[in-house]
């Protein structure tokens, strides 16, 4: 698929407007997908998201998932002991993920309250929020 057609398909199917340079500056799929998602959200510049990842191999692909808590727009380590994720098929440990302490939960709730009261999310109606969640 050529760049012009790709850009037109994104615009027609998702309402996302990109320029040719946006495609050429994101040659890897992960970079391109990030560019598309940010454009759909109305952001113009991507900031790099840093996190400790669990790396898994499945279906001939390497998958990376964050294992940390997401609090106040950042991935952070929990202050409680990590929790093992168990494979129900053979009871092997798939990975260990961070666990939140009471303090971590308090920080997360305060950050969510602040984001709701001061951010864009709290300014839109419940119906619009529901539509966005089920998009």
Image: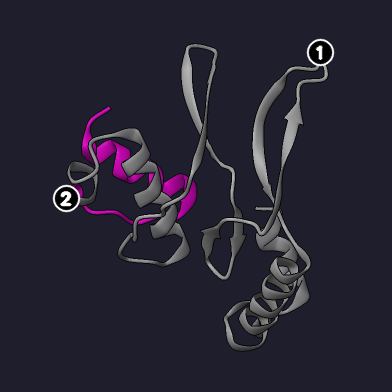
Q: Residue at x 45, y 55 (%)?
A: 15
Q: Residue at x 54, y 12 (%)?
A: 59
Residue 90, relative to residue 107: is it above or below? Answer: above
Residue 14 included in the magenta stretch of the image: yes
Residue 130, relative to residue 84: is it above or below? Answer: below
* Along the viewing direction, whichever of 23 and 104 lies nearer the viewer: 104
Q: Residue at x 60, y 88 (%)?
A: 118
Quadrant in which the N terminus appears: top left
Q: Residues within 10 Å of mark 1 (few under 14, many from 20)?
A: few
Is 8 on the left-hand or right-hand side of 23? right
Q: Which residue is mark 1?
A: 89
Q: Residue at x 77, y 71 (%)?
A: 127
Give the extent of the magenta segment.
1-21
Measuring from the top left, give residue 24's x and y in whole percent: 17, 42
Measuring from the top left, give residue 25's x and y in whole percent: 18, 46
As helix, strand or loop, the secondary structure at mark 1 comes to: loop
Q: Which residue is mark 2?
A: 21
As helix, strand or loop, the secondary structure at mark 2 comes to: helix
- Label annotation for residue 117: none
Q: CA separation, marks 1 and 2? A: 46 Å
Is 134 on the left-hand or right-hand side of 9? right
Measuring from the top left, give residue 129's x and y in whole percent: 70, 69
- CB-based contact (under 8 Å), mark 1 and mark 2: no
First reached walking from the N terminus: tag 1 or tag 2: 2
Residue 19 included in the magenta stretch of the image: yes
Residue 87, relative to residue 106: is it above or below? Answer: above
Answer with the quarter of the image where residue 116 lies.
Answer: bottom right
* Along the viewing direction, whichever of 84 and 120 lies nearer the viewer: 84
Q: Is residue 1 visible?
A: yes
């Amino acid at each position: 698929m050529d760049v012009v057609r790709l850009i037109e398909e994104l615009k027609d199917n998702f309402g996302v407007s990109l320029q040719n340079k946006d495609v050429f500056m994101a040659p890897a799929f992960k970079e391109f997908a990030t560019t598309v998602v940010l454009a759909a959200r109305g952001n113009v510049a991507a900031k790099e998201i840093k996190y400790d990842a669990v790396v898994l191999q499945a279906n001939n692909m390497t998958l990376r998932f964050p294992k940390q808590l997401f609090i106040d727009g950042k991935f952070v380590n929990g202050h409680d002991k990590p929790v093992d994720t168990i494979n129900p098929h053979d009871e092997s440990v798939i990975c260990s993920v961070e666990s939140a302490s009471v303090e971590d939960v308090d920080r997360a709730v305060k950050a969510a309250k602040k984001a709701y009261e001061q951010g864009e999310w709290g300014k839109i109606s419940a119906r619009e929020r529901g539509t966005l969640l089920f998009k």
